[in-house]
Amino acid sequence: MEVLQKKSFSRRKFVSIGLFLTLLILIITGILIQVFERFEEGVSIHFFTAVHVLAGLVFAVLAVLHTVTNWRSLKAYIKNKGVTVSREAVWGVLLVAIIILIGFLFAHRHF
């Protein structure tokens, strides 16, 4: 008879799988919210919105735990690689931020 060894709990695996699953929930509920947005009186939109918000909170907590758990590896990677930010990356981030800002301003204009 084969004896099974009990594996210890891995926080890294738990956090990584949790991040992946909550990301899937966020994507699915985000799409469903957009689909059911037309039916303002329906219970569905409220349910999906509540699930989306809770999944977002869980995702944020897991992201912090992921960073804390992998901090040593992340620090060593940055130190060894001598990470520098290219000019193209800075312009790309600025362009995306400007597009998001313009979209937000046009979506919430009051004039």
Image: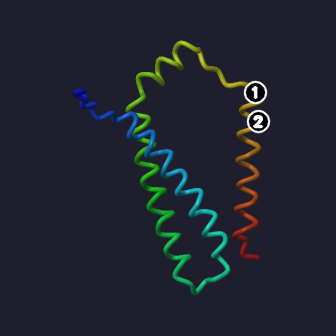
- The quarter holding residue 10 reads top left
Which one is in front, 109 or 42?
A: 42
Judge left or right: residue 95 versus residue 85.
right
- The quarter holding residue 14 reads top left
> Mark 1 = which residue?
87
Query: Dot 1: few (<14), some (14–19), or many (≥20) neighbours within 10 Å?
Result: few
Secondary structure under tag 2 reads: helix
In the rendered image, residue 33, in percent from the top left (x then y), is placed at 60, 69
Residue at 42% over, 45% down? 62
In the rendered image, residue 49, in percent from the top left (x then y), is placed at 52, 70
> Mark 2 = which residue?
91
Three-letter code for the amino acid on which mark 2 is drawn: Trp
Judge left or right: residue 97 versus residue 7.
right
Above or below — where is 77 with respect to 17? above
Judge left or right: residue 46 versus residue 89.
left
Q: Residue furthest top?
A: 80
Above or below — where is 57 with respect to 89? below
Query: Dot 2: few (<14), some (14–19), or many (≥20) neighbours within 10 Å?
Result: few
In the rendered image, residue 20, in percent from the top left (x then y), is placed at 50, 45
